Amino acid sequence: MKDFSVDKIRNIGLIGHGGVGKTSLGDALLFSMGEVNRLGKIDDGSTVSDYHPDEIERKISIVTALLHGVWHDWKINILDTPGYFDFIGDMKCVLRVTDLAIVVVSGVEGIEVGTEQVVEFADFYGIPRLFFVNRMDNEHVHYDQVIDSIQQRYGNGVVVFHFPVNPGEGFNKIVDLISMKLLTFESGDKGEVTVSDIPEELLEKAKNMRNRIVEAAAESDDQLLENYFETESLSDEQLIMGLRKGIYQRTIIPVLCGSAAKNYGMKQLLDVIGNFGPSPSDFEQIEAIDSEKGEPVTRKVSDNESLSCLVFKTISETHIGELSLVRVYSGTLSSGAEVLNSSQKHGERIGQIYLLNGKNRKEIGNLKAGDIGALVKLKQTSTGDTLCDKRNPIVLDRIQFPEPVLSVAIRPKSRSDEEKISDGLHILHDEDPSFHAVMDPELHQTIISGQGELHLSVIIKRLKDRFGVEVDEERPKIPYRETITSNADEKYRHKKQTGGAGQFAEVWMRIEPLNRGEGFQFDNAIKGGAISAVYIPSVEKGVKQVLESGPLAGYKVVDVKAIVYDGKEHPVDSKDIAFQVAGREVFKQCVLNARPILLEPIYDLEVKVPEECMGDVMGDLSGRRGKIMGMDAKGHFQIIKAKVPLAELDRYATTLRSLTSGRGLHSRSFSHYEPVPKEYEAKIIAEAKAKKEKETA
């Protein structure tokens, strides 16, 4: 492939709600650019993007696919993202490195909750966007309604570039408002068109819509606006300049339409991407941190600058190993080069560099500023790391991944697999940082957490397929806490005589409740040397053994102050172990006599749902002991804010999708601990005692 200057590169991300046709669109764009010789189909598993066995089996995208092709003078890099929000981490990776987001919406459903969410992410990164209304050949298509909803949601900047003449099952015609021509798509999947004049009955509508395009272009630049006021028109060159500037500045949001499945409208979309879409050079410079001085720096987007690039995704390929998808922001990345991973502060040697079309690879010698490719076998580089010139090191902003919303506990079916599980989970986290795995020492469980049931199902299947490990799923234990609500005062004598040296210790202790969150305090109030100073740490050590597994139900003890104020020792039999035992037992007695209670973790929950689902969702939250803290309207959606016990959030992501037909989203974060209601507390304590009796039987 020839070299492309930075101004001739286009980096686009296909984003949108699940099931709107992003993968079909990516395949149709590749076909139109001549990169493949047949149009792939989701149903027969022949698309370029969805090539992993999981994707072919489920008929959905699970992993971001990197595609590329050449259209006229432009090299176009396409990143096809999963639409299901279980794989939202991939979408965030893509939006971090994309210059133009193609928001794909269905001509039937229009804007869905996933659409709103991905547009918010694009706005967060300041990415220009373009809407493509797909499936215009569907019998239930409502193009005008979809346009109205997009304009209502995203304002006057939404400008229609195309409109369909005959939407529905017979769809094959659009009016192109840029060229002011009628385009009739020929049968077959070649995307060929017949260009003709706009019919008289559509001409007035087309002129009015064209005027809106010209006005939007003029409004993007003061000089253009002045020319427009003088002549009431713009030249073709002025129109292109104004549209490019407006799209880059995000004051213009074009809307195009077509059918990816039939390859209708793909060449026209490519023309718009090339003619009006921003190039990496339009962004002029990037912001970063000088990794040696820790100060903000900028770097021009240019081949002539020092190297800087971001590893935005790690994927694992059979027979190759890990591939690191990378975007070069400045300089040139060359095979064989020695570079610095400034995020991890170690060197890397660049091996092979590939251009990808799904699983198909094309080796190249280098990647220049603005371009995207794949690197093979980097030793210590993970998703989000910066690679740069050793002589001029900088660190680029890392990708912000969402917090998990669903957790399950897993245990290996074979104990010999524990190490393989640990290694596998570590690799899977490197590939997808929105997935977390921890061995919880408090709960004695391996907890995996992700963005939904499907996400974790895919992870568990990969453990089996790639690492040969089978696991059983369990419900994660809840990290309850034990605390006290009153003072208590006890003494305990430990005396053991079995021949030879004995054990003796007597400890007098009182305990007091602390404020929530203050943890544990230990005070020595011994007077007159009743207990030698050398034994006080032994008493504290014994107390801390109880803190890890409380006497009420075996959970951590918190927010307690323990004061040792008296005791006795023996000149021969007193020793460290004796005072540990006495400290442990007296503290247990004190806790049980200080009106102990259980605390449970409470989480802040934010749920985004369509208005018509709000009643069902709020009713469900109330049934989960949730407290509704407030509601906000956002377009056609409602944001419900609530505080809900963690014990009631098991599989909530699945329930929410069921209640909202897949249109609800939620996020959660830890808020605080509060007392468990008495009826629930009694049940938890009884279960803990039964389990302990079973283990000791």
Image (cartoon, grey):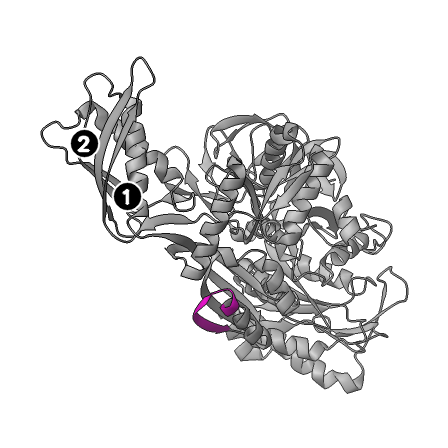
Q: Nearer the viewer, residue 66 or 692?
A: 692
The outermost residue toward the right is 187
Q: Secondary structure at mark 1?
A: helix
The number of numbered discs placed on residues in the rendered structure image is 2
Asked if marks 2 and 1 touch (Cβ < 8 Å), the reply is no
Q: Which mark is residue 569?
A: none
For label 2, the SS is strand
> Is residue 112 visible in this depiction of the protein?
no
Label number found at residue 567: 2
Q: Identify which residue, 381 or 290, lies in the foreground.
A: 381
The type of residue carrying mark 2 is Gly
Q: In terms of sequence position, does the residue under pointer 2 or pointer 1 come before the other?
A: 2
Where the N terminus falls, by quadrant?
top right
Most extreme residue toward the top is 500
The answer to whether residue 542 is left or right of residue 249 is left
Q: Residue 35: image x %, image y %?
A: 80, 47
Front residue of 228/563: it is 563
Percent across and percent down for residue 457 are: 67, 48
Q: Is residue 465 above or below residue 10?
A: above
Instruction: State the separation of the CA atoms marked 2 and 1.
Output: 15 Å
Label 2 neighbour load within 10 Å: few <14, some 14-19, many 20+: many
Q: Find residue 496 and report its horizontal and vertical position in percent.
A: 31, 23
Q: Is 501 on the left-hand or right-hand side of 601?
A: left
- Numbered tag placed on residue 590 in the rendering: 1
Front-most of 465 and 416? 416
Amino acid carrying label 1: it is Cys
Q: Report the magenta residues as a range.
A: 622-633
